[in-house]
Image (cartoon, grey):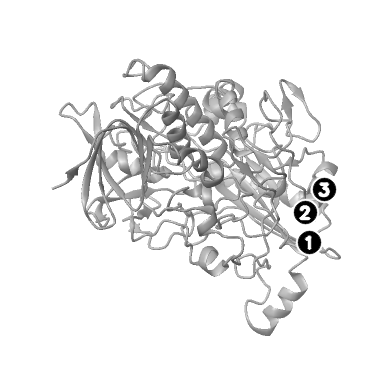
Amino acid sequence: MATKLPHKDVVIIGLGWTGSILAYELTGAGLDVVAIERGPWRDTATDFPPATAPDELRYGVHLDLFQRPAQSTVTLRNKTSQTALPVRQFISFLPGNGVGGAGVHWNGMTYRFSESDYQVKSHVTQRYGKSAIPDDMTLQDYPMTYAELEPHFDKFEKLLGIGGKAGNLRGTIQKGGDPFEGPRTNEYPNPPDKQPLGPTLFAKAAETLGYHPFPVPSANMSQSYTNPLGVTLGQCSFCGFCERFGCGNYAKSSPQTCVLPALMPRKNFEARTLCNVTRINLDSTGKKATGVTYVDQHGAEFTQPADLVLVCSFSFNAVHMLLVSGIGKPYDPTTGKGVVGRNYAYQCTSGVLVKLDNTLLNPFISSGVGGMALNDFNGDNFDHSGLGFIGGAVLQATQTGGRPITQINSFGDDPKWGAGWKKSVKENYQTIYALGTQGSVYPYKDSYLDLDPTYKDPYGVPLLRMTFDWHPNELKMSAFVTEKLADVGKAMGASRLAASSRKAPYSVTAYQTTHNTGGAVTGDNPHTSVVNKFGQSWDVHNVFVYGAALFPQNSGMNPTGTVGALTYFSVDAIKSQYLKNPGPLVPV
């Protein structure tokens, strides 16, 4: 029998970027807010003290900061004709675990998607015709434009203190920035990070080919910065322990360094950790949420009544919560009806390895986002006529570390063990450099999420099942952009080069990205989307969903910037409209 707790105005599921921002904004509006987090409490000073040497084995290999399959996992199959099997070790993607979520362990790349990415179906149809979109592709527009989101991008970037260089300032192209970006109201709040040698050589080579390199927008502080909440961050020390690690120097933006110091002192906020929400509770009509049920670390079950339920967990965990709670109609790939689980997507990455003789790259002197990028082959920034695919990728050279276990680069035919391996590492450690692409993944009828009919989690709840594989459009795109990246590598003066574009089938056995998107997509039609433009459920008006699960498809860039903008866009509507008149914000 679950213990019923005192009523709260708002219950938040998950205390990462979106959960912490929403809690700060809504407690500021006078609401009584509780956040329920499955993982442990994490604090910069106690969990990542700078006096303790970073432990690559603990964090980089044993993945101490990440969700454990024993807590909950997913099952995977490439095709509907296959039987899905549980993912027993997270490798391809690494969802966070604990307060701060993925904001603790990320590198800090904070792009804005291109203007056309938000109306990609309309844009592609207008420029290339309907035939350019494959019959099995379920491409759709966002229900809002870049212009509507721009003020919220600006607010998110100021919260994090993003360092970068504007490429389009109020409609005027700026030298040194990304000329393909949408118009920005303001320059970045901080200047770009200083660039290591590898990205510098990449940028020079790209310019000789007529491309437009720019500094990767970074959440690693290029200088000391105090954000609008009054929280101060310190300058990045280029320690090389960023991705998969927490930052003890308060130099990487995370909920711990940007939001929680201002949020936690508020008496109308409470965080409950090591508590797993098992479902969102609905009233007898099924049209209104009454709160959530959760289990604490001792196995005791509680119900938390609330007026508003905000789903802020990782993308596929958010979809899972909707499915097990019966909110929205599950997607059926056979009939094409239903919406929850529809349009699951990922990121299509590839790489080029170059050997640069007579260089000392010093890979260990690195921030999370020390790097240069180019958008010449992203989205629809280039003519796709006759190429046989749509979409594209950001091409980049980022120097994120030279750690001895996971960040030693070698070519496929180099020795893999023994004296030969030692000799190869000694000779190549400072001369081999990895370039990469992050490509778009568009949605398909047979790429989706649903509940597995066989496997269950420790609470007896069906696991989430992923059905996903690479499609010809993405494979052609990957081959194209990888060839363009190899051209830059050659222009860098590489004495040796190996290019690896993405190949089918999709596998979880090697890390790719943690940019899992879709399944609870935003739209203007309840027949093709789970939530409206404000992240509000079409079916249960007091449930809002956040994060990359809202993306109708994935663009060729990191998702965090758009996640932040969508969050501020939504909470503004909640404060200005919903709280005054609870109900649907968009007529059905």
Badge number at residue 196? 2
Element class at badge 2: loop
Earlier sequence position, callout 1 versus callout 3: 3
Badge number at residue 116? none
- Image quadrant in which the C terminus is located: top left
Kind of residue at disc 1: Leu
Element class at badge 1: loop
Which residue, given by chain and number where applicable, does mark 3 sit on?
A: 205
Left or right: 477, with 47 as reference point: right
Query: Mark 2 and 1 residues: CB-CB less than 8 Å, in contact?
Result: yes
- Looking at the picture, tell me which residue is in the foreground, 281 or 126: 281
Q: Report the Cα–Cα distance between label 2 and label 3.
A: 15 Å
Left or right: 208, with 284 as reference point: right
Point out residue 280 in the picture as x, y percentages from the top left corner.
Answer: 26, 38
- Looking at the picture, tell me which residue is in the foreground, 507 or 463: 463
Point out residue 419 in the picture as x, y percentages from the top left corner.
Answer: 68, 84
Count every numbered label the image shows and give the total. Answer: 3
Which residue, given by chain and number where applicable, does mark 1 sit on?
A: 361
Kind of residue at disc 2: Pro
Point out residue 313 in the picture as x, y percentages from the top left corner.
Answer: 40, 43
Which mark is nearer the camera, 1 or 3? 1
Which mark is nearer the camera, 2 or 3? 2
Q: Report the Cα–Cα distance between label 2 and label 1.
A: 8 Å
Kind of residue at disc 3: Ala
